[in-house]
Image (cartoon, grey):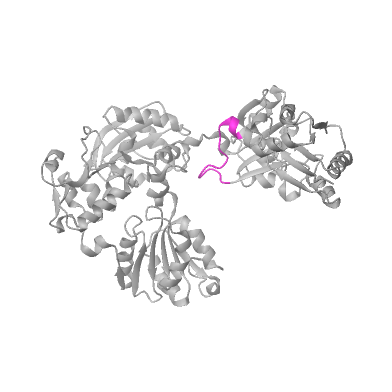
Amino acid sequence: MADGKVVFIGAGPGDPKLLTIKAKEALESADVVIWAGSLVNKDILAYASKDARLIDSAELTLPAIAAEMIVSVRAGKTVVRAHTGEPSLYGAIAEQIEILDNENIPFEIIPGVSSAFAAAASLHIEYTLPDVSQTLILTRRSGRTSVPEAESLPALASHRASMVIFLSTGMIDDVVSELVQGGYADDTPAAVVYRASWPDEKRIVGTLTTITGQVKEAGISRQALILVGEAVGRNIKSVSKLYDEGFSHGFRTAEKKACAVVAVTRRGWHTAARMLRTLDSADLFLPVKLTDDASSTPAQFYDDIKQLIAHIFYEYAQLVLVMASGIAVRLIAPHVTSKWQDPAVVIIDDSGKNIISLLSGHWGGANDLAEKLALVLGGHAVVTTESDVAGFPALDLLVKALAGGRIPENKKFLKTLQARMLEGAQIGFCPRDLSCFANMTKQSNLNFFDTVEELYNSGCTEGLIAHMPASPPLNVKKNFYVVPVRNIVAGIGCHKGIAVDEIEEELGRVLANLQLSIEALCCIATVDKKRGEKGLEGFCIRHAIPLSFYDADAINRIKTPSPKSKHALRVMGVQGVAEPCAILGSKGGELLRHKVKLKNMTIALARIPLQQMLEQNLI
């Protein structure tokens, strides 16, 4: 007997071009094709051989379908069973597989494109947006087929994650009621997509308040998905961090928790406790064996230190590991990537005598952290980076201060320039204000110039130039590293619900009037009552710009050129937002643009002087 088998394929959501290559090849080689005619697009049958027997299973029972498969396979034939979408999602393949197993019939499963993903593509959304939702729930409402109580819509809605609800459009009144009952707000974005990817596809977008009426007006009751969650109403470009290296790793504290302190012994616990008062927003982790003894210490307790490190290595900007260096190195080794991405790691022995900067000494700040903790503990800071040992400036930190925390574009060249400086080569810097950066004036081979022309005529064949915003374009020579300076702070007051694109357009226009661009911004500053304002947050994420908040006391202490705002005083208790926040964000810098009143926002601009940026290391 020739070998036969059953091949379950995901036929996709409707568009035959969404078949996978493997599914198409299975159709081409099939002797028998059993397809769900009520749901699967008949056009996929065009890929089947002209000699293949085609069977529509729409009116067949499970025993009849199973009998067709078994008889054909035992006759040595290949049977393709085509299911809509992805077979593992509401595909009813489990009972078929059980029958085939009992009959010793071989089979394989080829996954397909789910309608959940075709709907997202149609709506141009991403379900898993950073800081919005990192979870996607695929479910259905209980109906003729029951749902476990723990998976009821109210129970799942409590997570407020992105959700796709199958097979429930005919019960949309109840669906919306249960979603709101479970925890989604009335104004949560919602959508219904009918026959995603088919020629007659329909898309309805609204909120949980409006979607029921919209769906009924459209006459949709089946073959549709219900999508709900904040991500359904968000555009990926407003929040995505995936491809922005500068934001993902340049602003660690903007997206990561500040500092994790981990101890493994009782003595280490006491040493760690001595540091907590000095470390801002530090979280302490202790082994569970100390739970009772350390009950009065604000700490979290772990069972498995390997799992703990694997978690906090990516969640925190700084790690202080109170343990032997060998243990620490083995724990972090699987996670180390580069100094631009890794957290600062400092190792301290149990008694606090040796404080070792181990990882990301410059960019992550481990060197400074080690020095700080040495003062607290009365121990010895161990710093091994060559520039620090030799008393030279760290060029990566200089670039970090100038560029507002952005990762250098040409990291290799910067490394080469640092090496040449350590070798004693004559290195030129422009402008002269760069001399105020740490250790700049301690070495005789470092030279400073007021203009680029002076630098180029000086005889220095390599160097670093800080290019100020709104300055004329530079004639960049080989072996000179140019850093675009980001020293402009935008103070922004805005109405609730302002869109990212509106901020982009209006702020861009105000900047352009001063021959500046958004790339010149090092900070957005606003009143603390604007925390959670999605438009502001989305704009800052889009452009990798830190967002700073100031309270009423700080704002009302600032002297501003414009009169106090009666509206701001009445609503938020502050004299204004744009101007005082711009001044605060620039640490008292020069106010370049008094507040501009626009339709839904006010904007003021301030500039941090270069010398002040370097002396205070403002990043």
| Residue 309 lies in the magenta-colored region | no
Does 379 sit left or right of 36 as displayed? left
Question: In terms of image quadrants, where is residue 203?
Answer: top right
Viewer-proximal residue, 525 or 42?
42
The stretch drawn in magenta includes residue 132: yes
The furthest residue to the front:
1
Asked if residue 83 shows in the view, the reply is: no
| Residues drawn in magenta | 120-134
Where 31 sits versus 505, above or below? below
Residue at 48% x, 72% y: name it.
Answer: 264
- Determine the residue positioned at 75% across, 27% down: 42
At 44% from the left and 68% from the top, the residue drawn is 328
Numbered disc total = 0
Pinpoint residue 236: horizontal percent, then vertical percent.
Answer: 50, 36
- Residue 592 percent coordinates (x, y): 24, 34
Left or right? Give the position of 100 relative to 322: right
Out of 573 and 220, give the one closest to the viewer.
220
Res 208 → quadrant: top right
